Each structure stands twice: as C-alpha cells, then as structure tokens.
Amino acid sequence: MIVAERGSAWTPWVERFRLATPEVRVVLQHRGESMSALAMRVRTQLAELERHGLRPERAVIVGGGRTDGDALAARSGCLRAITSGMARGSGGEVLLDDSGSDRLAMAGLALAVNALTHGTGVTVAHVATDSRLAKVA
C-alpha cells in the first residue's frame, strides 16, 4: 500500500513495490482533500482489504512536506491503522518517506511507532532521502 500526500514524490515507490508485490494499492490525496479525509480513506481501504481476508505486508507513507498538527495527526492515524492490521496478521514493514521539509516529523513518527510495535512482527522506519529507494527492492 502506498499512501501519497499531495505534492509527494510517490511514483517511484509504485515500481519498487511492484517488483516484490504484484498488486499495489495507491491512496492519493485529492486536490482540496484534507489530511483527515485522506486518513479516513486509508482506514476505509484497509477495512475493505480485511473484509477480503487481506492485509498489506508492506506500506509506505509519502509525505508532501507539511509539518502542521493536522498533517501529523493524519499520518499518525494512517500509521496506526496500517500497523494494527499488520500486527493482527503475520507482521509487515511500513516506511515513512519525506519531502524534505517534513523530514524530522517523519523520522520522529517512525521512531516512536517502531518502539510501540516492538515484538509484533511489524517494523516502521524512516527512509533517508539519499537512499530512499535503494534498500526497498
């Protein structure tokens, strides 16, 4: 699953994920859509997958550069929904990619949630901009 905020560089992730996973679900933030509405759509997509007995094994949240409270809360909500589904299954990996200005926010969120998911089979990591795609394939 790829969660892409408006203005993010998400397209390289599609190709990288498709190398290992034949089906990639992309949730793009629409023009004028609030961050909270994007988070709600992510939760809806995850619920739809679970109804079919599926859970993402890999996911990436690609930031669009925002650092305000609404963006942080929405990212946190997306991350909780994704990781909780993975933890109920066989685990998984979630990556947080930044657009530069939101680097510290994404790194902090990844660090905090990774600590919370310890022992669940779920890992959460921030992807450094310089090597963002090299280690994913």
Image: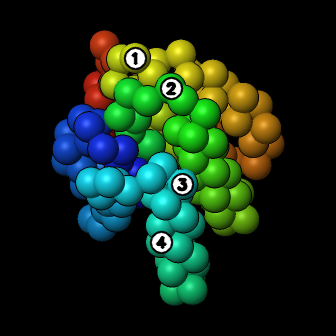
Residue 128 lies in quadrant: top left
Q: Mark 1 to mark 4: distance in Å? A: 28 Å
Type of amino acid under label 4: Gln
Crowd rating for badge 1 (residues with CA inside 10 Å; few <14, some 14–19, many 20+): few
Q: Return the x and y of residue 101 as percentages of the image width and height.
A: 40, 17
Q: Given contact means CB atoms under 8 Å apart, are the residues at marks 1 and 2 in contact? A: yes
Q: Mark 2 to mark 3: distance in Å? A: 14 Å
Crowd rating for badge 3 (residues with CA inside 10 Å; few <14, some 14–19, many 20+): some
Type of amino acid under label 1: Ser
Is residue 137 left or right of 49 when viewed as pictured? left
Residue 124 lies in quadrant: top right
Q: Return the x and y of residue 26 as percentages of the image width and height.
A: 32, 59
Q: Return the x and y of residue 130 as percentages of the image width and height.
A: 31, 13
Say which element carries label 4. helix
Q: Residue at x 57, y 47 (%)?
A: 74
Looking at the image, which is closer to me, 39 or 123?
39
Q: Mark 4 to mark 3: distance in Å? A: 14 Å
Ranked by sequence position, the earlier of labels 4 and 3 is 3
Say which element carries label 3. helix
Q: Residue at x 57, y 86 (%)?
A: 51
Q: Mark 3 to mark 1: distance in Å? A: 20 Å
Looking at the image, which is closer to me, 95 or 38?
38
Which residue is disc 1 drawn over?
Answer: 101
Which residue is disc 2 drawn over?
Answer: 67
Crowd rating for badge 2 (residues with CA inside 10 Å; few <14, some 14–19, many 20+): some
Ranked by sequence position, the earlier of labels 4 and 2 is 4
Ranked by sequence position, the earlier of labels 2 and 3 is 3
Numbered badge on residue 45: 4
